[in-house]
Every structure is written in C-alpha cells, then in structure tokens.
Amino acid sequence: MQPQLPSLKRLQSFFLDITSRSFGQLGVGDKRIAEYVADLLTEFSFSDRWLRMRGADGRRMTSVVEMLAAQLGPESERRILDERQFRKYVGDYTLFMSGLFRRFVERGGYLRYYIDEGRRSYEKVSALDAALYRPGFLVFDELSKGFEYYSGALDYMRQCFFAPAPNEDPFAGFLRQIEGWMRTGISEN
C-alpha cells in the first residue's frame, strides 16, 4: 500500500534534506543531482517500484544480470546479432575492397570513407561481442584500431603476389593465383 500524497511529500522532503546535507558535506553533486537522488530514494521506498522487474516465472528479479538477460530475449538478441552480422560484413567488405582493390576504390574517390567506415564497423562488432560476452572481441578491436594498416598490408600483398603482367587485366593475377590454389588443393576454404 502506498502512502497518501502528504505522507509521500514528507518522505520526499526527508530524503531531499538528508541527501542535500550529505552531498554538501562531501562536496559532491549539485541541487539537481540531490533532487534526483531524493526522488529516486522516495520512489524506491516501495518494494513494488524497486523490485518491479519480474522474470518469465513471475519471480521478482534482484540481479542486474537477470534484468539485462531478460531484456536480451530472443527478439532483442536477434536484432543485436543481425546488427553484428551486418557490421562485420561492412568491415570485411571495406577491408577487402580497400586492400585488394584499392585502385578501384581510389578511382571512385572513396578510399577514406571505406577506411573510416571499416574502422567504425569493426569497432561496433567488438563492442557488441564484448557486451554479449563473446570471445574474440579483441580481434575486432584490433582490426578497428589498425584498419588503415591492415588495408595497406592487403594492398601491399596484392602488389607483391597478385600483380598483373603488363597490359593484363588487373584481376587476372589474383584469379590465376586462386585457380592455382584450387587445382593444387592448397586452399582450405
């Protein structure tokens, strides 16, 4: 049972007074913060407010982990995994194109955009993986931080190992290499 409005105002006033004094003595926060915390304490004085989240079984949740997991139900988790998959694809695509097909990307005038977007995409994948407690988030963090270097390394690799012969299609060397791998079984893909 919740108290009547006059009782609620007295409770709120009580919390505001002790919160303001405590914060003032410690030199933390300001009036707005003290008011917010006092309002929070007033609201959470009622168990139905601070224990309002319930599990699928109707039991009140007291663990933050439980609360967060409940928010990541199948639908929410699906959206997060879809976002992760999309961001990973964008990171992979931009790395591939800005590395192995750099001249094409440069001709289009969007190399900087590809590098920036690839970095952002891998950063997002890393953050999502960390939030989902997935191993490997450090790989994407590193790819994000060093995206431009990795893209440059792929461009260097292309120049060294997939260089076309003079007056040859620029993709020919790359395709020849892949066909060789497939014939000899070197590729494990």
Image: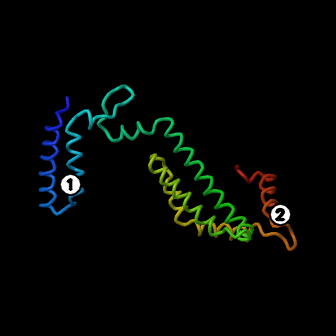
Quadrant holding the N terminus: top left
Residue furthest bottom as drawn: 166
Residue furthest front as drawn: 6
Circle 2 sits on which residue?
172
Task: Name which residue lies at 37% across and 25% down.
Answer: 57
Circle 1 sits on which residue?
34
Residue furthest top as drawn: 57
For label 2, the SS is helix
Of 17 and 113, the residue lying toward us: 17
Q: Tell me if residue 26 comes above or below residue 57 in the rendering.
A: below
Q: Which dot, 2 or 1, sits closer to the camera? A: 1
**Residue 41 picture quarter:** top left
Query: Are circles 2 and 1 on residues that touch, CB within 8 Å?
Result: no
Q: Tell me if residue 141 comes above or below residue 159 in the rendering.
A: above
Residue 32, percent from left and from top: 24, 57
Q: Amino acid type of disc 2?
A: Ala
Of 171 and 21, the residue lying toward us: 21
The Cα atoms of the two marked residues, 2 and 1, are separated by 69 Å
Q: Amino acid type of disc 1?
A: Ala
Q: Which of the marked residues, 2 or 1, is nearer the chain's N terminus?
A: 1
Mark 2 Cα shell of 10 Å, populated few (<14), some (14-19), many (≥20): some
Residue 148, percent from left and from top: 59, 68
Side (left or right) of 123 relative to 153: left
Side (left or right) of 154 relative to 75: right
Q: How many labels does the image show?
A: 2
Q: Tell me if residue 145 comes above or below residue 41 in the rendering.
A: below
Task: Name which residue lies at 71% across and 71% down.
Answer: 106
Residue furthest right as drawn: 167
